[in-house]
Amino acid sequence: MTNRAYVIAGSEATGGAGVQADLKAFQELGVYGMGTLTCIVSYDPKNDWNHRFVPIQPGVIADQIEAATTCHDLDVVKLGMLGTSDTIDVVEEALKRQEWRHVVLDPVLICKGQEPGAALDTDKALTAQILPLATVITPNHFEARTLAGMESIDTVDDLIEAARRIHALGPQHVVVKGGTELPGPDAVDVHFDGEDVTVLSAPKIGEERVSGAGCTFAAAITAELAKGTDVGAAVQVAKDMVREGITQRLITHAPFASVVPIAP
């Protein structure tokens, strides 16, 4: 039987991130994927490539979720860009309607096209309503600092402290990604399962952020969990996939490159 994975996230028109990147990662790892769009994000080449953010109506999101979950027996889902409090309400309600083996949350806390006040409301709603439902949460450096309430994350010990604080908010597994923002020669990620800490470290591939790395990382974890892989092994596959994807990154006319999801 074909393994299936589901994603609820935004569309990113250049193909480097969002649902477009998620479905590529699913396919590359041998999983049949389907997606529900929560918003449409378009980079604006005329405005320093900032985001143009258009939320999809909550009723339309609910319709998509109904179609996907009725058509397929789904028990593993990745959540990406939700974007508004109304969207979070709809997604929370849908998630609670059935049992999920795994909910993977990539906690996108801010989109440059949002007003600061609206973004803050969304952050609070995400933390209160979605975070406790997550099996796995994959915050980046900024997101981890925000969720953990820490002024700075400068060391591996800081990453571990952030993971412990975020775990206390409800998710079962926390994977904090140091990325290029953590000082030092290595890209370090920390996985905390409530008891044990696993540190995953590999040399950085340049110092620039690459579009879609976070989406691909969480999508790879989701695909592996859909196949029955345990969380620790899924995280390692995800890190390997993103490293390979950054090595093979696609250079575009934008001022950033895009990850190319490649199975490790």
Image: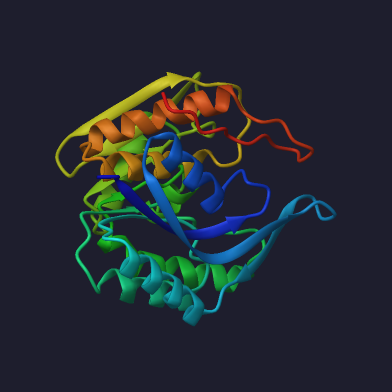
Q: How is the image coloured?
A: rainbow
- From the image, which quarter does the C terminus lie in? top left
Question: Taking the image as drawn, is residue 153 in sight?
Answer: no
Residue at horizontal 47 percent and vertical 31 percent from the top: 242
Percent position of residue 237, x then y: 35, 29
- From the image, which quarter does the N terminus lie in? top left
Q: Is residue 40 above or below residue 34?
A: below
Q: Is residue 56 above or below residue 221?
A: below
Residue at horizontal 46 percent and vertical 50 percent from the top: 143
Percent position of residue 225, x then y: 27, 43
* 12 relative position to 165: left or right: right
Percent position of residue 117, x then y: 58, 73
Residue lying at the far front of the rendered structure: 1
> Which of the 4 image quarters holds residue 251?
top right
Residue at horizontal 50 percent and vertical 18 percent from the top: 185
* 110 relative position to 157: left or right: right
Q: How many marks overall?
A: 0
Question: Taking the image as drawn, is residue 219 in sight?
Answer: yes
Residue at horizontal 30 percent and vertical 52 percent from the top: 166
Percent position of residue 12, x then y: 62, 54
Q: Is residue 135 above or below residue 114?
A: above
Nearest to the observer: residue 33 or residue 212: 33
Residue lying at the far left of the rendered structure: 195
